[in-house]
Image (cartoon, grey):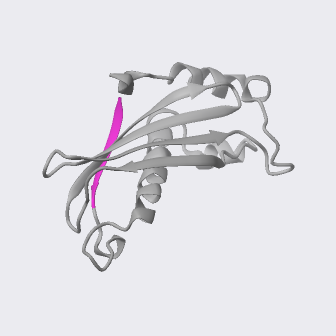
Amino acid sequence: MWSFKRQVNYYETDRMGVVHHSNYLRYLEEARYVWMEDVMIPYPEIEKQGIIVPCTSAEETFLNFLRYGDEFSVHMELSKFTGVRMHFRYKVYNETTGDLCLEAETVHYTTTREDYKPTSVKRSHPELFEKLQSLVSNEMDD
């Protein structure tokens, strides 16, 4: 399972001193882009190939709070890939306390800027398809 760490910035917190719920989606997106760069190719390179990967759904379950200055980690995996749709699962941990703060899943699809209709990368970009297929994991099922 892949993970990435960073600290909570002050501007990401709300008046109660905890991370505003909207920022967790940003954390997931940041982790996804770093993951792509780390294990595959940078997202800008995917876009240069004419592919974009919009999000179609996001589901989050909040379990604990993160606060300003907390170091946190986002553990994630590509749990399913059909050649068109990608399912990612995430767990966000407070590295200071060890608490699990968030469980989430996002679903994305591959398309082009021309029409935004689902596009199979299996046909259009077989190397990218093979790489993504090789990254599918279900370690978080435990």
Residue ranking furthest to the right = 115
Name the image quarter holding residue 15: bottom left
Identified at 35% across, 70% down, the residue is 12
Residue ranking furthest to the bottom = 15
Identified at 56% across, 34% down, the residue is 87
Instruction: Give the quarter of the figure containing the C terminus.
Output: top left
What are the residue bounds of the magenta stretch? 1-7
Instruction: Give the quarter of the figure containing the N terminus.
Output: top left
Residue ranking furthest to the left = 97
Identified at 28% across, 74% down, the residue is 10
x, y percent for residue 89: 45, 36
x, y percent for residue 42: 54, 44
Name the image quarter holding residue 132: top right
> In the rendered image of this protein, does residue 123 appear above or below residue 42?
above
Q: Is residue 3 magenta?
A: yes
Looking at the image, residue 105 sits to the left or right of residue 128; the answer is left
